[in-house]
């Protein structure tokens, strides 16, 4: 059976409506099960209860809807979501005479390492900028939501045992990395790409990614991460690359919290902002390298 993609026939509007409907049903189902289980077993105020509730909501809101949509809309769900071998390009250079020698595969992984390292510094610098933005009255509600989220994270990190660390790795690293990338880069960016083109799709999905976190004091760094993950998804041809970068970033944040006795640091992890500025260079070089590799592999398509 050949590959089929029903979304090409449905169009952007219908595909988005189907995806929203699936998301609402999934969140209601998995979130409802999680809420009922937590209330009757642990209580909503306990750290274990919050952890189970966070897990059920993440599964219902981010992880399952893309999987359901891909299963329903495509005969090859993994390819639909971009879960291809890393890296993947639409190129067959060795089948063409006098083809240009392409960069070796390990260049892509070296570039991703540069992006991963440089992103820590870029996020740190953008956090400085974000905290310097003036406060507006209309932002009070959002800031209150962020404070509530910070309080929840503090509760989740209140215990320092290895078993709790393993549970937090699953809830705060593994599930978010897979679920959010499947949702925002695997489906949302794909839908927007078909109608608006790659750059606009990356920007819009990154904005949705930033607003979904409900953290106005971290809006700029989260938006930057969304942009980075979006372009990396395109330039590597695989969703595994942003999943990997996302997991590394969340692991770094979780590790920093445990080193800081279970408290998420709200100040710079680098000695000075000028070091952050210099640290962005590897990120820029890595992204440019990925784009160059992508262009080399796909030049025959243009």
Image (tube, rainbow, N blue to C red):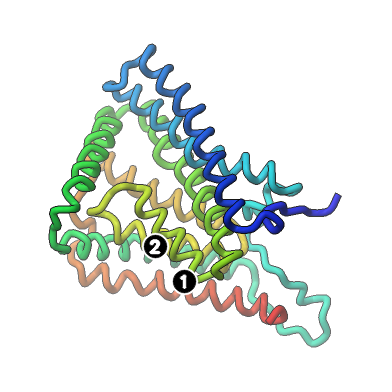
Distance from label 1 to label 2 (Cα)? Answer: 9 Å
Quadrant of the rendered image containing residue 284 = bottom left
Q: Residue at x 51, y 56 (%)?
A: 242
Q: Which residue is mark 2?
A: 117
| Outermost residue to the top | 40
**Sequence-wise, which precedes: disc 1 or disc 2?**
2
Front in this rendered view, residue 89 or 140: 140
Position of the C terminus by quadrant: bottom right
Label 1 crowding class (10 Å Cα cut-off): few <14, some 14-19, many 20+?
many
Q: Are marks 1 and 2 in contact (CB under 8 Å)?
A: yes
Give the number of the disc on residue 286: 1
Residue 13 in percent (x, y) is at 57, 55
Q: Is residue 260 visible?
A: no
Q: Residue at x 46, y 55 (%)?
A: 245
Residue 15 visible: yes
Side (left or right) of 282 relative to 298: left
- Secondary structure of the residue carrying tag 2 is helix
């Amino acid at each position: 059976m050949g590959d089929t993609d029903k979304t090409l026939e449905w169009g952007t509007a219908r595909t988005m409506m189907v995806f929203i409907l699936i998301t609402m049903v999934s969140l209601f189902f998995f979130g409802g099960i999680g809420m009922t289980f937590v209330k009757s077993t642990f209580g909503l105020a306990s750290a274990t209860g919050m952890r189970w509730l966070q897990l059920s909501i993440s599964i219902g809101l981010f992880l399952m809807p893309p999987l359901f949509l891909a299963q329903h809309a495509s005969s090859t769900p993994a390819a639909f979501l971009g879960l291809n071998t890393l890296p993947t390009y639409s190129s067959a250079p060795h089948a063409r005479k006098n083809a240009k020698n392409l960069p070796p595969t390990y260049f892509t992984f070296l570039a991703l390492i540069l992006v991963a390292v440089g992103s820590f510094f870029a996020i740190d610098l953008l956090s400085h900028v974000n905290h310097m933005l003036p406060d507006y009255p209309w932002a009070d509600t959002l800031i209150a939501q962020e404070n509530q989220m910070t309080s929840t994270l503090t509760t989740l990190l209140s215990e320092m045992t290895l078993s709790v660390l393993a549970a937090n790795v699953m809830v705060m690293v593994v599930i978010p990395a897979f679920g959010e990338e499947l949702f925002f880069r695997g489906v949302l960016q794909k839908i927007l790409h078909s109608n608006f083109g790659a750059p606009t799709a990356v920007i819009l999905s990154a904005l949705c990614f930033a607003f979904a976190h409900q953290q106005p004091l971290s809006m700029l760094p989260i938006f930057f991460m969304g942009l980075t993950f979006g372009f990396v998804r395109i330039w590597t041809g695989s969703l595994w690359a942003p999943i990997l970068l996302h997991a590394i970033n969340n692991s770094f944040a979780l590790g920093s919290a445990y080193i800081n006795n279970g408290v998420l640091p709200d100040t710079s992890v680098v000695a000075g902002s000028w070091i952050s500025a210099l640290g962005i260079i590897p990120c820029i070089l890595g992204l440019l390298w990925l784009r160059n590799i992508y262009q080399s592999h796909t030049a025959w398509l243009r």
